[in-house]
Amino acid sequence: MAKKLVIVESPSKSKTISRYLGNDYSVAASVGHIRDLATSGKGGLGIDVDNGFTPNYQILDKKKGVVKELNTLIKSAKEIYLATDPDREGEAISWHLYDTLNIKGKEVKRVVFNEITKDAVINAINHPRDIDMNLVSSQETRRMMDRIIGFKLSTLLQAKIKSKSAGRVQSAALKLIVDLEREIEKFIPEEYYEIYANFGKVETQLFKVNGENPDIKTDEEATSLINNLKDYFLVKELSTKESKSYSKPALTTSALQQAAANKYNYTAEKTMRIAQVLYEGLEYRGEMVGLITYMRTDSTRLSDQFVNETKDFIKNSFGSKYVGFYRTPKNKENAQDAHEAIRPTSVLRTPEDFKTYLDQQDTIKSKAKDEKSSSVTSSQLYKIYKLIYDKAVGSLMSPSVNEVTTLLLQNENTIFKASCSKPLFDGYLKLTKDYEDKEKKTSDIENFTEGDTIKADKIEKKQLFTTPPARYTEAKLIKDMEDLGIGRPSTYASTLSTLSNRKYVHVEDKKLIPTDQGKITIDQLNQFFHDFISPSYSRKMEETLDEIAEGNELQLNVLQDFYNYFEPLVNKAKIKMEKLAPVKTGETCPKCGSPMVKKNGKYGEFEACSRFPKCKYIKPKEKLQPQDTTVKCPSCNVGTLVVKVATKGKNKGKKFLACSEFPKCKYISPLKVVDELCPDCDNVVVTDEQGVTRCITGKKC
């Protein structure tokens, strides 16, 4: 048996690390947390609030076997290395292991590494430290506050308005979504006009009127302005200048989630699952290796070693002119900066080389800690690795240079403007152009000459209307959460998942739309917990937790201040928050004659007697018969297309077209069903693959 035991969180990570260490070491995994607060005691909190907020921890039922196995390994080990993740939660897991396992008399060391490579792991083993109890206290404070909030506030909302949960970060994020939706609902479009003058392939837009920005509100104003123009325009100015565009820093957790959402439509949860696999390690060209550094970070800092190696790589691969300079990042005020930005562990491991290897592999299975086994494909691994690689290397490359030409045309008291951009040097865009916004270009501007007069081919007005603010996407919400200090990098993905799982928001065309339950939840929280769910409170609490981590604040003081503030709010809401009355259906119970009401259960909405539990009548759900369109199935030419409703999966509740001969014919039509009927024949209306909305009968209608 090995004399030295290394304990990590993930089984995947343990396989990688075991390859790096000699026979003197054995590596085992705790598979995340092994214990948590009990649900016993006053209020089921697992915290003795009256005696210094003393926590009562219990080993998780599903981890009792893990603890037993670890204790068996410990018996034959003289040295224990706690190598959990390099963040506060990882520090807390190490302390729980230390406090729970039978390791008295053993030499216990804490080791951390930001990347899972042989050099990094061995260096960490050779330079251990003690468990940082300030970090542990910070994480423990967060956990105890989450338990108090979760039990007290969630229980209150469940009893009063049937909302499933609430929390400091979760509710602050939901408030952003609901507040924006209310702004959209109140929005009244306003008419305005833009005016364009076209000269061959060059389109110019009205830029100034009497030296001011144009503000044309009516058709009459636009028509009058055009009528007052002369036939010929004076080429007032034709100027050219060089413009430099500098690369953005390497990715943080938030930036990675935003980029993956915008480029690949990945959810934050999916992105982090893929990144976890890349971090924990894959068998790559005969060795187990972690391909990226730790993926939960709010720092854009890069190590000196990576910077120097990458500059050499850029010079050798692209030439000296592509080598940029490393700008020491100015991290945000609330950034922890515990470790580096997300980057490849080796700049020599290019995405192209990685893809060549992955193409030869089968689908890779990942077991993320505390989550069910889930598949991550080679294609997904390549996309996220390439994104991380290109952004990190690109951040150290020289700026791109464009030649920007601006044309100004004068006519009476107006100035019309056009511009074009011609690339002179791609710089960092050689790697990151696929992730950049494309610039609009106007051609043939160079053919104009200052002082010339020219007649427009066409002058036209365009009627436009102001648009409401765009709804949140996952990417935009994460950005605002980061900017406002709501939560930390490790919480973004779980917060978004919670909002969706609790049915507070639903996703439509990538947009986050609050449900009625989400709106009701925020309305009540706004009334009784307004300051608590504000971004400023969340930011202040994160700063306070940082102070505990740095040893500048005492855990007990923070918990007592929080409890003294929060408990009176809950007690007041218990008395004054009105209980939401069930929605009546208009029918009466066939058993007792009481009103029937709508309720929500595990399997969705149902109708039941309002006198429950005295009367337990539940109305049976009517099985909807498929609507027959009478249109022949193009696959079997026997059955007809019928409208069905999906009962499970991500499309649950949505209508689709399928063959009436199912299961003999399993054809499903690509046509999308529209919730309206054809005014001519009352048949189904559909949207085809070209986006055209029409009656399903086509020409026959």
Image (cartoon, rainbow, N blue to C red):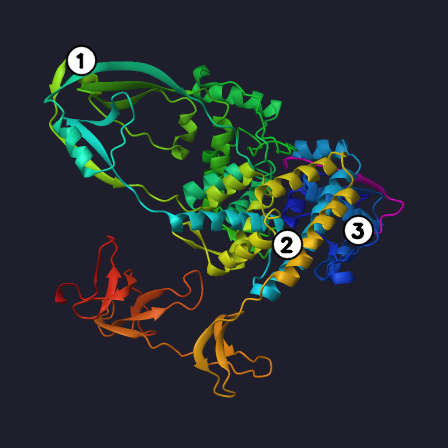
The residue depicted at 53 percent of the width and 33 percent of the height is 251
Q: Where does the image place residue 241, in percent across and percent down from the top left?
A: 32, 14
Q: Where does the image place residue 88, in percent across and percent down from the top left?
A: 69, 41
Residues 67 and 682: in front is: 682
Residue 441 to residue 470: above or below: above
Q: Nearer the viewer, mark 3 or mark 1?
A: 3
Q: Amino acid at mark 3?
A: Phe
Q: Amino acid at mark 2?
A: Asp
Check residue 108 for magenta coloring: yes
Q: Where does the image place residue 700, in percent across and percent down from the top left?
A: 13, 67
For residue 367, the mark is none
Looking at marks 3 and 1 on the same chain, the residue that comes earlier in the sequence is marked by: 3
Looking at marks 2 and 3 on the same chain, the residue that comes earlier in the sequence is marked by: 3
* Residue that mark 1 sits on: 449
Q: Nearer the viewer, mark 2 or mark 3?
A: 3
The furthest residue to the right? 105
Quarter of the rendering containing residue 155 = bottom right
For residue 53, the mark is 3
Left or right relative to 429: residue 694: left
Q: Which residues are magenta?
A: 100-117
* Residue that mark 2 sits on: 370
- Which image quadrant: the C terminus? bottom left
Secondary-structure class at tag 1: loop
The furthest residue to the bottom? 591
